[in-house]
Amino acid sequence: MAAPSHARDSESILIKNVQILHIDEENARLDRNMSILVENGRIARIRPTQETERASSVRVIDGNGRIAMAGLVDMHVHVWDRASLGAYLAAGVTTIRNASGMPFHLRLIQEIDQGAIAAPRLITTGPILNSPGPNEQVNHQIVTTADEARAAVQQQHQAGYRSLKVYSNLTREAYEAVLNEANRLGMSVMGHTPEGVRAAGVPREVPFEIAFEEILDDGFVTIEHVESIVWHGLRDRHDEDAGRVLARKVAASGVPIDPTLLAFYNLLKVAETKGAYLQRPGTERLNPLLVALSQAEYERWASEDVVRNRAAFEFYKTMVRMLLEEGALIVAGSDAGIFTNIPGVSLIDELELLEEAGLAPVDVLRTATINAAIALDEADSSGRIAEGFRADIVLLDDDPTEELAAMRSISAVVAGGEWIDRAALDLHLVQAAQHDTARTQRNLVEALEAQGIDPSIVGL
């Protein structure tokens, strides 16, 4: 599959006559009639257009007064194959964090970094670490004892992963060993909050073996999914007073939160439409192997209780608003690539749900730019349009701080210094629906075999 033609990192680009959107201050600010010089994948210089000198070696692009803002970061995706990568660029997403690593992701990162393929910057965790229990999945790396957990972390480190994802069924023994070994090896941790062994009556009659509050000072890069926070932190009670207290504890801990409201919203939409939502435009960009493996889940959610799940979703939005009001750092993740969460555009859907939850547009935009950079410990190199920062830029026709829908009208993207115009972005969307199912199957088989799992278990 050929990639659209666009500039390489070595090409210098001068984007003149743009309005630079700054959202790092209390109020958003537009610097008008500016020019941005990009060299070697970085923003080399920002000057008023009238003061900018053109060098013969620089490619000049007229922004025609469009708004330039930092590229978006999707903090929670699932990449099954390289075909989906261009769909993220088409939505203005210039960095993605893959939350379930496979060996091919490590090779893909190298290709992207070398400029071999057009793609957002890719960050990945290793395979998901979990223990046996109700949330166990076939692609999880299952550990129960401390020895098993240490061995799994060491294996992932040796394979090349530097970030771990933990899951909700982890036993206390395994979880504590994961943390200790990660600290020893300098690996970061993110994911669901581990609950320990789930006894009968958990959570309403019996408390979790590992209390949610115990996790808050464990150094997570992010805690994922607001519905998981409500489940674990509130023992699934939709109680606003208790939610406010929990939000204060989360904010005081400083751990960033990735709500992924869209993950539950799309489940709800499938229930409300009795499955028709699964055929909406854009779903052709979902990986066919993922779709095939998800049929049982689709059928279950097509017949789920709509009233109960709508009420739950409304509380999840309230919880996100309270987390923001109490000062928690909120980042944006879409959970794209699983269920019916479409690569790329799902992050824009997530941003709109965050606004629906009560966040102002400028706060929403921060979740996918500045806040993500802070959570990833990159605040001095990404998340803003500033000299010396990574050249990840989105050009828009309208101001998204006035109307968030402007994020759906992207004129062009600069990803790691590479210019991609609207025609190339459109071609990326077309190519994202041209799947290589055999290659995807090889990716998954390789991942399962690396964990000692027989691929025939899932029919591969």
Image (spheres, grey):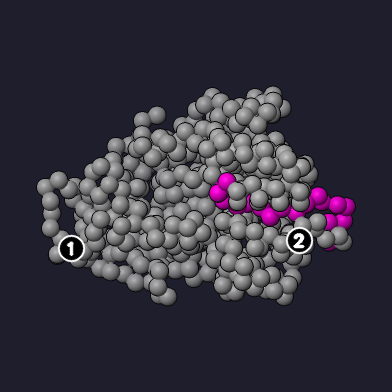
The answer to whether residue 368 of the structure is visible from this angle is no
Residue lying at 55% horizontally and 35% vertically, measured from the top left: 159
Residue lying at 11% horizontally and 47% vertically, measured from the top left: 56
Would you name the residue on which mark 2 appears? Answer: 211
What SS does tag 1 mark?
A: helix
At label 2, the amino acid type is Ala
For the C terminus, the image quarter is: top right
Q: Earlier in the sequence, mark 2 or mark 1?
A: 1
Please determine whether, in this image, residue 147 is positioned above or below residue 193.
Answer: above
Specify whether 300 is left or right of 439.
right
What range is drawn magenta here?
185-204
Q: Where's residue 269, x and y in %?
A: 63, 52
Closest to the observer: 378 or 95? Answer: 378
Residue lying at 62% horizontally and 29% vertically, measured from the top left: 450
Tell which tag, 2 or 1, sits nearer the viewer.
Answer: 2
Q: CA distance from mark 2 to mark 1?
A: 56 Å
